[in-house]
Amino acid sequence: MIDDDREWLEGAGGRSRVARPEIVDSWRRCRLSGVNPDDVTVVPGEPCLDSRIARVAIPVLSAMADIMIGANTSLLLSAPDGTMLWRWSEDSRLAALLDRRSAVVGTRWNEDIIGTNGLGTALETTRPIVVNGAEHFSEALHAFTCAGAPIRHPVTRRVAGVLSVTSLVEDASPLMAPTLLKLAREVEEQLYSESTVRERELLHHFLAERRRGRNAVVAVNEDVVIANKAGARLQVDHRALWNQVEAGVRDSANLELDVADGTGPVQWHTIEHAGSVVGLVIVAEPTEPSRPVPRRATTDVDAPRTPRWPQLAGLLREFARGCDRLIVAGETGAGKRTLLNETFGPVEELDCAAAEEIGSETWLGLARSTLVRDRTSGPVMLAHLEALGAPTCRALGRILDAVPRSDGPLAVAATWNPPGGEPEPAVRALLDRFAAEPFEVPPLRKRPDDVMRRLVGQGPGMPVLSAEAAERVRVHPWPGNHRQLEEFRRWLSRQNRPVLDVGDLPPGWSREAARARLTTIQAAEADAIADALRLHDGNKAAAASHLGISRSSLYRKMREYRLR
């Protein structure tokens, strides 16, 4: 079948569509580069064992090679230029075959030299890949299966090297790819731990500034330059800029900054550590208007932008003007009580949920003494109004009727988490004693900027989220709102990894994010599939049989519902 793909690539025959797109793309690059498909071309490189990737990775990989014993595999490490720096093999037969194919230290395994292979193709695409048997462009490598993954420097995010796990086709295991990613991550963590404090501070400030908007951002010190795509277009002379900082320039008015024409307003600030300047961050506003984002539906055209947390207090204060009673509504944990305290506080709080604990008569007596007496210190907050039963609601309504009304200032506020459906008549009558419309506190899933504000800029000790992980955090549904966010922040502070990627986030997140977009029927179907997979210990064939569907349908549903 794969031979049919090769004939199609050469311009003859019909395509079988068996080979994966990434493999066919690699073959096309190999063909354009003139790679010999019949044999391996040996090109010597210059293995620098004193390079940072060699000094850091080889001891880590040598120490962890024990986990590969018994798997008949080999570990290969290459430099960023494709030169093999190190090889470990447990199986003497595999080692002999690798020697015969010139897979030895000092040879270059770039894709444009060797053809499709784990080291070279991972280096070319900067993405992990598994190349199995006949997927290699060179027939001389068809006996091997190799998984390759780039190792990125956690500060600069540049490819520092490539790691490959290689075996014979008959010894290949589905665990090769996850094992490879684990080893690559261990090397990246060691690279981070050996990075200087200056590099870590530079990375921390760069990421914090980048996540505040779509501006061009450049972070620089004497050795390292980090920039986003817009920052790379500034064409800043980084060396000349740093020379000015070293010469003592600290005032932005005195900094000579030569950037590309058409750049908007530019700001900059120094990064200091232990009393000395360790870096410089440059931020430039874009001058060209961003491309319009297509709207998903016409109903979204005039939709107002959800206010961020710093804006809510001002909006609530304006909403309460001339009103002595109001209700602040929103989901559990959205921040209703915190907002009232920040806006009018400190407020005296009566927890309606305590009525069941201490008895309704005792609680109503406390409410009567608190609400009826003259107040000069601020409003009373009735928290969790939805926790009151119908009889208590009627009694509380009579107490409120005894409280004198005015045109302001605010005297009584209540927090309310609206249950599904229409409230009972007694509850409705109590709500009618407040302002006609409640003030809505939007849930966190509608305020991604507030989420990132709580997680970014927490200090050098906190792990850094990769761009993909940060985006997953932004789109997470946050069903527990601020309580869940605070628990996540605590979880984040306990992680030992310096940089967290999507795969490092809590395992239930993918499913939770997918479920937030499911209908009731889809959610029930997702639960049934998850239960079947759990019942059969992840065996997909058995789960499909249990559900009465084909295995291909199960895979499609798992992708649709983001089940693992």
Image (tube, helix red, strand yellow):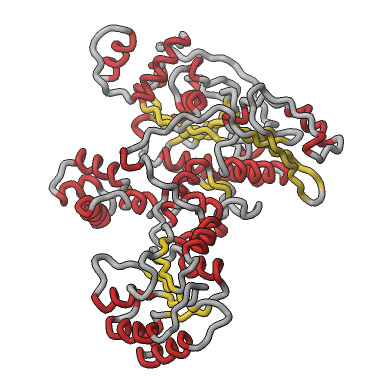
Front-most of 144 and 509?
A: 509
Q: Residue at x 67, y 27 (%)?
A: 48
Query: What is the x, y in percent for residue 521?
Result: 19, 52
Front-most of 460 and 495?
A: 460
Residue 196 in sight from this viewpoint: yes
Query: What is the x, y in percent for residue 383?
Result: 43, 75
Front-most of 326 and 60?
A: 326
Is 274 situated left or right of 299 in this image?
right
Asked if 43 appears above or below 286 in the picture, the reply is above
Q: Residue at x 46, y 27 (%)?
A: 118
Instruction: State the residue lying farthest toward the left.
Output: 548
Determine which quarter of the picture holds residue 363. Answer: bottom left
Query: What is the x, y in percent for residue 67?
Result: 48, 46
Q: Residue at x 45, y 35 (%)?
A: 73
Count of all numbered marks drawn on residues in the image: 0
Query: What is the x, y in percent for residue 324?
Result: 46, 73
Residue 54 in sight from this viewpoint: no
Instruction: State the residue lying farthest toward the right.
Output: 247
Question: Looking at the figure, which quarter contains the N terminus?
Answer: top left
Is 416 situated left or right of 164 in this image?
left
Front-most of 321 and 148?
A: 321
Is 557 situated left or right of 383 in this image?
left
